Amino acid sequence: MAINKELPVKLHVKSGDTVKVIAGDERGKTGVIKSVNRVTQRVIVDGLNLVTKHNKPSAKSPQGGITKMEAPMHVSNVQAIDPKTGDRVRKAPVTKKA
């Protein structure tokens, strides 16, 4: 099934949610979502799914070098965690702002 890259989709997680990775190399680890892309259905989890990026020397960084950065992962590979109990939940917990 192809992903429609034109319309944003409603997802079960949002930025700031604590999630547990349920598939892939980072399976079993938890982290906080930094950003969500609703069009491509991908999330970036803080400190997980790190990739190595080689940077060429430029005016901004004359030395260049190798940096580690988080790569996006598909939203189906994460599941929301209830902040009170720490258990995985099917739907994202609703937090009331007082």
Image: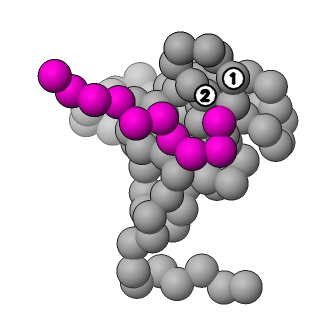
| Quadrant that contains the N terminus | bottom right
Quadrant housing residue 87: top right
Q: State the SS at label 1.
A: loop
Q: CA distance from mark 2 to mark 1?
A: 6 Å
Q: Which residue is mark 1?
A: 87
Q: Nearer the viewer, residue 89 or 19?
A: 89
Q: In the shown orientation, is residue 51 left or right of residue 42?
A: right
Amino acid at dot 2 = Ile
Q: Which label's residue is closer to the chain start, 2 or 1?
A: 2
Q: In the shown orientation, is residue 77 left or right of residue 84?
A: right
- Identify the disc placed on residue 81: 2
Q: Nearer the viewer, residue 40 or 60?
A: 40
Judge whether 86 appears above or below 5 on screen. above
Q: In the shown orientation, is residue 76 left or right of residue 53?
A: right
x and y, in percent, of residue 60 in the image:
26, 32
Residue at x 61%, y 52% (from the top left corner): 75
| Quadrant that contains the C terminus | top left
Q: Residues within 10 Å of mark 1 (few under 14, many from 20)?
A: few
Instruction: Determine contact: label 2, label 1, CB under 8 Å.
Output: yes
Residue at x 52%, y 84% (from the top left corner): 4
Q: Is residue 22 at least partly visible in the picture?
A: yes
Q: Residues within 10 Å of mark 2 (few under 14, many from 20)?
A: many
Q: Is residue 56 magenta?
A: no
Judge whether 29 appears above or below 7 on screen. above
Q: State the SS at label 2.
A: loop
Q: Is residue 43 at least partly visible in the picture?
A: no
x and y, in percent, of residue 35 in the image:
40, 42
Main SS category, magenta section: loop
x and y, in percent, of residue 50 in the image:
64, 31
Amino acid at dot 1 = Asp
The magenta-colored residue range is: 89-98
